[in-house]
Image (cartoon, rainbow, N blue to C red):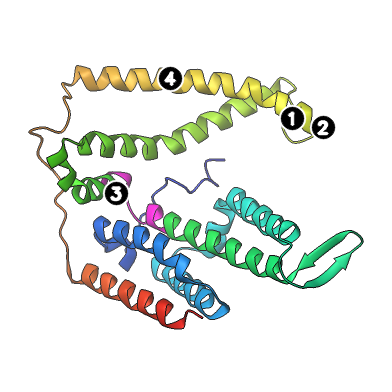
Amino acid sequence: MMEKMIFGRYIPGDSVLHRLDPRSKLLFVFGFILIVFLANNVITYSLLVGFVLMLILISKMNISFLMNGLKPVIILIVFTFFLQLFFNKEGAVIFSIGKVHIHEEGLRMAIFISTRFFLLVFVTTLMTLTTTPITLTDGLESLMKPLNRFNFPVHELALMMSISLRFIPTLMDETDKIMKAQMARGVEFSSGPIKDRIKAIVPLLIPLFVSSFKRAEELATAMEARGYRGGEGRTKYRLLEWEGRDTGAAVVFLVLMALLIWLRS
């Protein structure tokens, strides 16, 4: 499970995406989440798909590695596709099998919504794969720094996100160990009726929650023992620098947004 899990992991590399400032990557991802809704026809969605494929090529990531790591999400995307396909009854009927009717608008929305979901998942995954959790946290804290004027706990929020990203692979590893221990005792997670599978998850969740709370308590104790008192008065070991390639990434994003607006029907 750990080998297949990619969300929250960092893959070392020397690509352009790896060298970008984390603030520029965060701004790009936040902006991409907004502009993806500008796409409303085949041309604009094709432009976004081509752009994301170009990002994968630039990042030097193996697309088969990404697809294997995102299998659970891809299953959810396929489920969303069929949900829209069979339950959207707008437009003319283009295909019928007995009482099941596929409408024109249902097919259109199924393709567009699943493609949108696919694009968002791949862009956010590329950001985490090419940015270390610590650097990502520093970038988020830097972007949110103006909120300090309103007494917003920016440093504490960034620390929480850093710890969360750090412990995703750890929790997945813990889940894998518990599943193997339960399977050695005869528990079946992948066979039998759905009702029995759901019941089998309960013995998995209870030790996982207990282990998570214990780990959180140990971490809090360790931080207090080392004198952690929040972000006030703390200095930075890693300094972020906005360089020319980050400005270039911002220009590319603006060009992409302009094209989407222009090509909208």
**Disc 4 designates what residue?**
213
Precedes in sequence: disc 4 or disc 3: 3
Residue 193: image tag: 2
Mark 2: few/some/many CA within 10 Å (<14, 14-19, 20+): few
Quick one: 40 or 33, which is closer to the camera?
40
- Estimate the spatial distance between the alpha carbons at disc 1 and disc 4, rounded to whole Å: 25 Å
Q: Residue at x 53, y 77 (%)?
A: 46
Residue 86 included in the magenta stretch of the image: no
Amino acid tagged 1: Arg
Q: Is residue 56 visible?
A: no
Mark 4: few/some/many CA within 10 Å (<14, 14-19, 20+): few
The answer to whether the residue labelled 2 contacts the one labelled 4, judged by CB atoms less than 8 Å apart, is: no
Where does residue 196 sit, x and y in percent of width and height? Answer: 77, 26
**Disc 1 designates what residue?**
197
Q: Judging from the image, what secondary structure is the residue with disc 3 in?
A: helix
- Estimate the spatial distance between the alpha carbons at disc 2 and disc 4, rounded to whole Å: 31 Å
- Estimate the spatial distance between the alpha carbons at disc 1 and disc 2, rounded to whole Å: 6 Å
Precedes in sequence: disc 2 or disc 4: 2
Where does residue 87 sit, x and y in percent of width and height? Answer: 73, 56
Precedes in sequence: disc 3 or disc 1: 3
